[in-house]
Amino acid sequence: MNLDELTQTSGEWLRGTGPESDIVMCSRIRLARNLNDFPFINRASRSEKGEIETHIRTAIAAVSDNLAYLELNQRSKLDLQFLVERQLISREHASADYPRGVAIGPHENVSIMVNEEDHVRIQAMHSGLSLHDVWEQINALDDQLEERLSYAFSSQLGYLTACPTNVGTGIRVGVMLHLPALVQTKQIDKVFRALQKINLAVRGLYGEGTQAFGDFYQISNQQTLGNSELELIRNLTEVVPQIIEYERTARQKLVSERRQHLHDQVSRAYGVLKTAHTISSEETMHLLSSVRMGINLGLIDDLEIPTVNELFIHTQPAHLQKIQGTPLEVDERNVARASYLRSRLSNGRHTEAN
Amino acid sequence: MTCQRCSDEASVHLTETVDGRPTELHLCVPCARKAGIVLPEKPPALGLDAVVQGLIVAHVGELVGDLAELACPDCGIKFMEFRAQGRLGCPADYDVFRRGLIPLIFRHHGATRHVGKIPRRSRAGTDRARLRLRAVLRDTIALEDYENAARIRDQLRHKDADR
C-alpha cells in the first residue's frame, strides 16, 4: 500500500451517507484480543513482540487478500501521524518503538492494529448510524482470525485484555457525532453529564484526552463486562437518537430565533475558508464545523457534506505535508492549508476528490 | 467543673440512669479510677493523621501487605506494579491477582461475569505452560545462557507443532 496514494482518497466513513449522517459522522466498533501464550505488550520482550507480530500478520494474510499490511516500526513520524489522522491507528500505536503494524481493509472500513495496547485491536467504521452493520462485519472478521489464533479467554471473565477496563467482550462501541448547535447553545455539558450517569464516555475526534475538534464528539461504552456485545450496541443505539433529537432541536432554535446571526456566522466561516491566505488547523476545524451545519440547514447550497468531511481530515498537518509532498513547519503549513482550502472550495459545486 | 469527690478539675463526665432518672457524674481521673470506671488508655485519635490513615487503608489497602508483593510466576509483574501502570503483564495475571482484581473489575464494570461472545475454538483459554516456558526463556537470555535458551526455543517449537 502506497500511503501517498491515500491522499487522493478518503475513507468510506467520510462519505456522509447512511442514516442520520448529517449528525452522525460514523459508527465504529473495536475489539481487543490477545494471544493466550504470550505476555501482554508491556511485559513482552522485543523479540516476543516480533513473534507476536509475525503470528498475527500470518493469520491476517490467511484471512483475506484485501487487507494491506503495513509494518510500522520503520515508518517515518509523518507517515505515522498521517495514519493517526485517518483514524487507522491510535496515537499510542504511532508513538511506540517496537515491532508492530496495521492491516487496512478496502475503503478503510477496517483496520487491525497489531501490538497496540493489546496484541490485536480490530476496528470497523461505517458512515452514519449503522452499528449493526459494523458489528456484522467486525464479528465475522474476528471469527476468521480466531480460527487461526488462540485468544486469551476465561469462561468467567471473557476475553482477557492488558487493561482490566476492557476485559469481557473487549468491545468499544462508538459513534462520532457532530454537535455544533448543542455547543453554541451551551447545552453540551448537560448532555455529557447525562451520558456519564449512564456510563457512556465522551471523547474528542482523536480519542482519549483529545479536545473536541470541530464540535465532533465520540460517545462510547465504558463497561465491557456483564453485558453482551449486542446489549452494548443496543444501549448506544437507544441513546444516540435522543442526542440527535437534542441537536436538531437546538439547530431549529438557532434557525427560528437567531436566523440572521446564524446565516452570518455560516457565510463568514465559508468566506474565510474560501479566501484566507494563512489559517491554523484549529480555526479551520472551527469554521468547517459552521459550514457543515450550514449545509445541513440549507444555508449553503454549492458545497457537499462529503467534501467538508474530507476537508476535516485533509487539512490536518500530516495530510497537508503528504499532499504537498514536502515537510512543512507550522507557518508554512498554515499557508499551505489556506491554499489547499481555496483550491478545494473555489469552483462552484464541489464533489469528493476521489 | 470540679470533681464531685475532691476539688480537682473534673475530666470524666458520665450520665447514668438510676431508677429511671438520669444522674450526672463529674469526676477527676483518679477519683473515676477509684470508683471503678474503666478509662481508655489514650483518648481516641481523631486528628488529621488518623483520618488520612483511614483513607489510605480504605482506598489502597491492597497496596500494603502480601497482595502488593505478590508476583506472577509467568510474567514476573507484581500486583503493585500493575496498580502503578494500569496494565497487566500476561493473561495468567487474572488468576494470580484474582483477589485484588475482582473488586477493581466490579467497581469499573458493575459485574464480574462475562455474558458475551465465546470463542468457538476450544483452544482459547490461557496457555500457562507456554507462558511459563517463555518466562524461563526471557530469564535465560537475560543471563546470556544461550545454550539453555536454544533448548527452550526447541521445546516451544515442538509445542507449536503439537498445536
Image: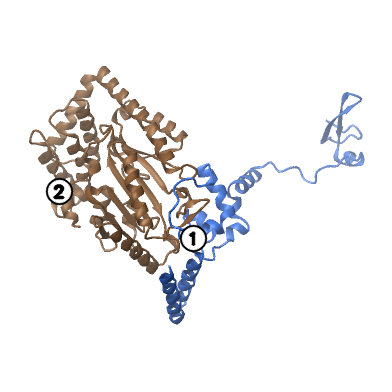
Residue at image position (39%, 32%) is: A238
Q: Label 1: how many residues lie within 10 Å, few (<14), some (14-19) or many (20+)? A: many
Tell me the chain of label 1: B
Q: Nearer the viewer, mark 2 or mark 1?
A: 1
Local SS, label 2: loop
The number of numbered badges drawn on the structure is: 2
Which residue is most to the top? A257
What is chain A's hue in the picture?
brown
Q: Can residue A333 be seen by looking at this rendering?
A: yes
Alpha carbon of mark 2 to alpha carbon of mark 1: how far? 44 Å
Q: Which residue is mark 1?
A: B126
The residue nearer to you, when weighing A112 against A145, is A145
Residue A178 coordinates in the image, percent (x, y): 29, 34
On screen, residue A49 versus residue B130, left or right, reads left
Q: Which mark is residue B40?
A: none
Is the C-beta separation of discs 2 and 1 under 8 Å? no
On screen, residue B36 versus residue A318, left or right, reads right
Tell me the chain of label 2: A
What is chain B's hue in the picture?
blue
Q: Is residue A24 above or below residue A83?
A: above
What kind of colouring is applied to the model shown? by chain
Local SS, label 1: loop
Q: Is residue A19 above or below residue A108?
A: above
Residue at image position (18%, 40%) is: A279
Hey, what amino acid is under mark 2?
A: Gln
Q: Label 2: how many residues lie within 10 Å, few (<14), some (14-19) or many (20+)? A: few
Q: Quadrant of the C terminus of chain A?
A: top left
Residue A145 coordinates in the image, percent (x, y): 35, 56
Q: Name the image quarter holding residue B154.
A: bottom left
Hey, what amino acid is under mark 1?
A: Thr
Residue A163 coordinates in the image, percent (x, y): 46, 52
Q: Which residue is mark 2?
A: A8
